[in-house]
Amino acid sequence: MNNNTTFASLALAEPLLRAIKDSGYTTPTPIQAQAIPHVLLGGDVLAAAQTGTGKTAGFTLPILHQLLTKPLQKMVAGRPRALILAPTRELAAQVEESVRLYSKHTKIRSLVIFGGVNINPQINALRQPIDIVVATPGRLLDHVGQKNIDLSGVETLVLDEADRMLDMGFIRDIRRILKLIPEQRQSLLFSATFSEEIRALAKSSLRDPIEISVAPRNTTSELITQEMVQTEQRHKRDLVSHIIRQSGWHQVLVFCRTKHGANRLAEKLSKDGLSAAALHGNKSQAARTRALTGFKSGKVAVLVATDIAARGLDIDQLPYVINFELPQVAEDYVHRIGRTGRAGSEGRAISLVDSSETRLLKAIERLIKRPISPIEIEGFVPPEPSAEAAEKPTAPNRDRRSAPARNNNRRSGSSSGSQSRSGQRSRRSSGAAPSNI
Ligand code: AMP
């Protein structure tokens, strides 16, 4: 609400304030400052918030506070008081990790439930009293069907990344779940974008919600440098490899449109000596977890992911995102590059765009209401179509070191005025800045 809000002034319970302090947070983010007081009062919330805004703590902290201050006489096994629905396994796991983090000085118990893994450990866990369940809709309904979980005690429902849940076809599952939980409840809906369908879902599931919007809808963070490179589809794999190797980037998330494309790119990068892994829905849960853990720990330098798999990933200060292809849906561009530039740190997003993607690029620029700066990649010479000796850069790489790659976070727009190099194609006649990557 205002800049003077502190966690202490939000009157959260002491064990929560301690956990916040342990996390190193000093002030609430704007969404937290707006959502927490309202949720504490029991109201419903409809929030437009991108990942990276601190929305998870925005709903988790007040839910924990309510659970602490309104304890039940007797807890019943498999009957949660708060239910958080998330679209993907990764996001569900991440949200539950946050719940654990913020509740670590309390006795509150949480559980994450998602598909693709053995159901038995989840069944066993549901035989214990549980306060908060974080779940993906499909597996949750499996448990309902097997009578492992009783949703009639849910006091607070959170629909996290609701737009993505609808994109993934979960609307019928969500409606079924809504029928299983009490009508007298508190509901919080978070979505990065607001389509007609989201509005309809909000209307049918929320009561007099306050509407919160922390970043203007469908805009991207000012902290992210957004650039594009005009190229051809057949050169993209070489180009990605070149960019990452030349710059020495150690943590890059690359988005591909297809699972097959993600696999092929990860293979190519591995062949070029980079530690790369693919993350998509055809991978087993174990492989997905391995890829993600490796990426977070720094063992895997390049994670090549499809949109759905990467949804909601929160990786601390992820510096670089590459769009191997532009997404078909312009809003997905906002989600993709929202992986970087989080919680105040700077980020850089580069999109590789071929001539068939010009229309998509225009749609994205319209949506984010700003142009994406065209740049050129130093030292990259596309391999000849027929030549096998394709890979090595032939141009002398004279000014390769003109700026350290890591600090290459120029703001878009600030680089205008640079000359286009001959021999490289530029989408625009002016403003195409050579980049030393
Ligand atoms: P989220 O948007 O919920 O995915 O959160 C994005 C990141 O912001 C997470 O890594 C949180 O740990 C971090 N975060 C959440 N709240 C704060 C805060 N008040 N101050 C600093 N970082 C925060």
Image: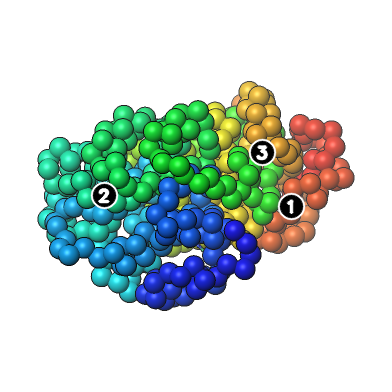
Q: Nearer the viewer, residue 112 or 378?
A: 112
- Residue 424's place in the image compared with 92, above or below, is above
Respond yes or no on whether mark 2 lies under 8 Å from ligand 1: no
Q: Is residue 150 left or right of residue 237?
A: left
- Disc 2 versus disc 1: distance between alpha carbons? 46 Å
**Helix, strand or loop status at disc 3:** helix
Three-letter amino acid code at disc 2?
Val
Locate residue 210, reporting x and y percent. Answer: 50, 46
- Disc 1 versus disc 3: distance between alpha carbons? 15 Å
- Residue 68's place in the image compared with 184, above or below, is below
Three-letter amino acid code at disc 3?
Ile
Q: Which mark is on residue 154? A: 2
Residue 166 quadrant: top left
Identify the residue at horizontal 17%, vertical 43% (top origin): 143
Identify the residue at horizontal 67%, vertical 26% (top origin): 358
Mark 3 — residue? Answer: 368
Foreground mark, 2 or 1, reads 2
Residue 388 seen? no
